[in-house]
Amino acid sequence: TLWLDSEVDDFYLEYGRYIIEFNREDKGIPVEERQPIKLMIMSPGGLLYINNALIDLIKLSKTPVYGYNIGTAESAACFIFMACHKRFALPKSRFLLHKGSTSNMSGTYDQVAADMEEYERLINDLAAFILDHSSISSQELIENLGGEWYVTAKDAHEKYGFVEEIVDDIDALL
């Protein structure tokens, strides 16, 4: 069990190391017999490049990674949650989907223009990821992703399809 319970920053690269190590330890064990990695999430989000690294490692992991939203999974934490092989949420938990922040762009015009072009590419990749990992329509994504789009656990489960189960028994977390 791993806890993503603060801002997604360089610290969480350690979780990428754990995922690789758990897969190394499980090598040779059939996937269906592997003990899943439980990722408990209560995070305001954070850095996009850490988000992308963890998404890739979770997707590559043969040892299943189960995501549990235990309160809030915002921004990068929401997207990391969506990458998990199975996804669960507590009844009152919520998600925040948005395009994030570009507050660290500075420099010459050409540098800022290049940074903005790269940011736009990353946001387009993120939008494609959301569409692939939910039942959110392209139109609804376009209408909502530009702002702060909060989604309840119930809507994530029943309407948008990125929560498989609402947890109603503490044993599911053990």
Image: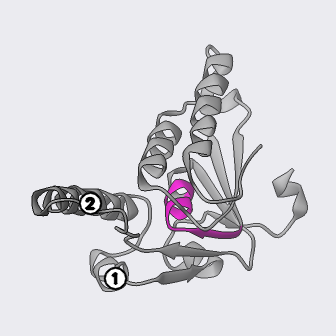
Above or below 90: residue 48: above
Q: Amino acid at mark 1?
A: Glu
The location of residue 7, given as percent across then percent down, is: 61, 59
- Position of 168 relative to 66 (above/below): below
- Identify the residue shown where x is 70% and y is 28%: 33
Q: Which residue is mark 1?
A: 140
Q: Secondary structure at mark 1?
A: helix
User: Which mark, residue 119?
Assistant: 2
Q: Is residue 111 left or right of residue 123?
A: left
**Dots 1 and 2: beta carbons under 8 Å?**
no
The quarter in which the N terminus is drawn is: top right
Residue at mark 1 to residue at mark 2: CA–CA distance: 21 Å
Q: Is residue 138 left or right of residue 91?
A: left
Q: Residues within 10 Å of mark 2 (few under 14, many from 20)?
A: some
Secondary element type, mark 2: helix
Amino acid type, mark 2 = Tyr
**Magenta span has 80?**
yes
Asked if residue 163 lies left or right of residue 146, the reply is right
Residue 90: % across, % down: 75, 70
Residue lying furthest front in this view?
A: 108
Residue 94 placement (x, y as % from top left): 63, 76
Residue 134 in the figure: left or right of residue 74? left
| Residue occupying the point 67% across, 61% down | 88
Q: Is residue 17 above or below residue 104?
A: above
Q: Residue at x 31, y 86 (%)?
A: 143
The percent position of residue 148, horizontal first and vertical second, equals 46, 83
Frontmost of labels 1 and 2 is 2
Task: State the extent of the magenta-drawn residues as a range.
Answer: 71-81
2 within the magenta span: no
Q: Which residue is located at x 52 percent, y 58 percent? A: 82
Q: Answer with the quarter of the image where residue 6 lies.
A: bottom right
